[in-house]
Image (tube, rainbow, N blue to C red):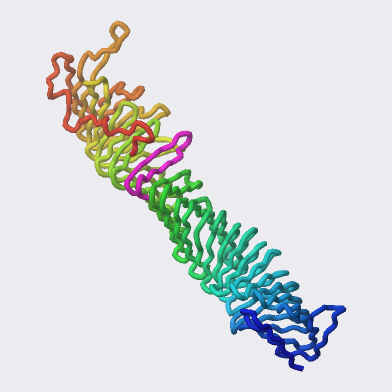
């Protein structure tokens, strides 16, 4: 039986009844409505509705029951147990086992408000979306689907699940055609050993690339990369950060800060530039280091840190400058290259290459190779000086305690004596010897021991030749010395 009904004056046109096996009027059940049963089909605009039975009202509403479905064009299909369709505004309220699908997604929910005119569907009682192309499953308490742009807007308890990742948040947009998820609010992305925390940004679930525009954090087994903006490519393992960048490695007891940073989770290599600072926890003390560029890479037994150009570092018992510094956890060595200068107490040490061996987080031994030079401040105009080819130093808890100088060793040593309760310089010991041992006390030269036959002379202070007071290379460079953490910059 084919029936029809017109709606004069309705801007959306008439609801057209295409088919029903039976039709009747029963004002006791539905006053003013035509009751239709069996293979019922309606058409309105570009939508086709099917159901087992329905009431068609004069005011252009349809109440449908049993195997209800609405097909809009060739792409969007909705089905439910029952529905109320308003032809005047082209909206449908669907209830009971609601399913909406198109070529790339499937939505299930207890109830759905479908606005066919404005291409919008809304659920408020929880929903589950399966992306057919991306293998993503999304759930949320509330959601809106923009059918034209294929964009979902999720809120409250949002979870995006995938065999390789899980994304949880409060507000998320998801485009089913592209697989791109956008975040608005606190969001956590978890995959394998990696976790990402962000406030705002987007993640391409198919290309596995992320862009975050608010403070975000990437965690990777005890290592973190944090910045005001972050980009991350999972396939290459590359993470890029801008603005107040912080790289933390709890296993290696270090933090690296800067303006810009790169970290690769596959190679575990990090590069920091722009006000770059390394904070290295060493026992009960901390080393603060600055260089134009800082690199951290994995070593055979820990981390390797490299600092390049204008390197300066500060620790309470030791400070230094150089152009290149390398620290290796494998051998616990700090290496200084290219015009290195090291200060400890009132001692200044220079050479072509300086190595500092650490033990239990503290300086243990010092190696100065080629053109080794120690300058120690006695007072504002007098300086003890020791030079040789190589120099080996030994540290105690109070700083540098002794030095062994080898190869063409030379010294200018100001001998002091106590007079009237006050230490005064009484002479200058000028000596050449192949090997010299220097003992230091409270950061000053205490004794000098000549291990081979020395060529030495002791001058009274008032008779020492001026040229014997300062050896070549004994420049005192205290103005370059970092005095606190801030001064490394």
- Up the image or down, 415 lies above or below 201; here it is above
User: Where 451 sits versus 424, above or below?
Assistant: below
Q: Please, is residue 429 above or below residue 66 in the view?
A: above
Location of residue 130 by image quarter = bottom right
Percent from the top left, x then y, of residue 48?
66, 84
Looking at the rendered structure, the number of numbered marks drawn on it comes to: 0
Percent x, y of residue 361: 45, 38
Decide if residue 419 is on the left or right side of residue 32. left
Q: Does the magenta stretch include residue 6?
A: no
- Name the quadrant of the C terminus: top left
* Secondary structure that dominates the magenta span: strand
Residue at 63% of width from left, 71% of height from top? 121
Q: Give the range drawn in magenta.
A: 272-293
Q: Position of residue 423 (x, y in %)?
A: 29, 12
**Where's the N terminus, which quadrant?**
bottom right
The residue shown at (85%, 78%) is 29
Query: Which image quadrant is residue 483 in?
Result: top left
In reply to whether residue 285 is colored magenta, the answer given is yes
Residue under the image location 30 percent in, 38 percent down = 321
The answer to whether residue 107 is left or right of residue 39 is left
């Amino acid at each position: 039986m084919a029936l029809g009904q017109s709606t004069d004056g309705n801007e959306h046109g008439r609801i057209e009844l295409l088919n029903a096996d039976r039709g009747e009027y029963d004002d006791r059940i539905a006053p003013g409505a035509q009751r239709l049963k069996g293979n019922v089909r309606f058409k309105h605009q570009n939508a086709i509705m099917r159901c087992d039975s329905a009431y068609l009202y004069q005011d252009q509403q349809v109440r449908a029951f049993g195997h209800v479905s609405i097909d809009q064009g060739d792409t969007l299909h909705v089905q439910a147990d029952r529905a109320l369709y308003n032809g005047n505004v082209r909206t449908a309220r669907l209830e009971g086992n609601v399913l909406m699908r198109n070529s790339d997604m499937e939505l299930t929910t207890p109830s759905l408000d479908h606005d066919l005119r404005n291409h919008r569907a809304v659920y408020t009682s929880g929903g589950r979306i399966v992306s057919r192309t991306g293998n993503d499953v999304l759930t949320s308490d509330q959601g809106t689907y923009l059918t034209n742009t294929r964009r979902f807007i999720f809120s409250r308890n949002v979870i995006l699940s995938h065999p390789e990742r899980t994304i949880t948040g409060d507000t998320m947009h998801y485009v089913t055609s592209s697989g791109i998820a956008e975040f608005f609010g606190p969001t956590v992305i978890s995959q394998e050993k990696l976790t990402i925390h962000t406030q705002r940004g987007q993640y391409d679930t198919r290309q596995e690339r992320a862009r975050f525009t608010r403070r975000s954090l990437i965690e990777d087994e005890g290592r973190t990369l944090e910045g005001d903006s972050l980009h991350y490519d999972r396939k290459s393992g590359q993470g890029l950060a801008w603005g107040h960048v912080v790289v933390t490695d709890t296993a290696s007891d270090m933090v690296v800060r800067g303006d810009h940073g790169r970290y690769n989770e596959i190679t575990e290599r990090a590069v920091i530039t722009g006000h770059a600072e390394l904070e290295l926890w060493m026992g009960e003390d901390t080393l603060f280091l600055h260089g134009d560029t800082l690199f951290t890479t994995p070593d055979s037994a820990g981390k390797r840190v490299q600092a390049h150009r204008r390197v300066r570092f500060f620790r309470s018992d030791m400070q230094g400058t150089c152009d290149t510094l390398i620290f290796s956890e494998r051998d616990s060595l700090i290496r200084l290259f290219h015009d290195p200068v090291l200060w400890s107490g009132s001692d200044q040490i220079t050479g072509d290459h300086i190595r500092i061996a650490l033990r239990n987080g503290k300086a243990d031994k010092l190696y100065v190779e080629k053109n080794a030079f120690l300058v120690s401040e006695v007072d504002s105009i007098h300086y003890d000086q020791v030079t040789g080819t190589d120099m080996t130093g030994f540290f105690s808890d109070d700083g540098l305690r002794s030095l062994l100088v080898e190869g063409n060793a030379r010294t200018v040593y100001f001998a002091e004596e106590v007079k009237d309760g006050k230490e005064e310089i009484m002479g200058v010991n000028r000596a050449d010897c192949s090997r010299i041992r220097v003992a230091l006390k409270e950061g000053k030269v205490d004794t000098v021991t000549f291990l081979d036959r020395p060529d030495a002379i002791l001058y009274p202070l008032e008779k020492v030749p001026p040229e014997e007071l300062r050896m070549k290379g004994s420049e005192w460079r205290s103005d370059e010395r970092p005095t606190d953490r801030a001064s490394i910059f």
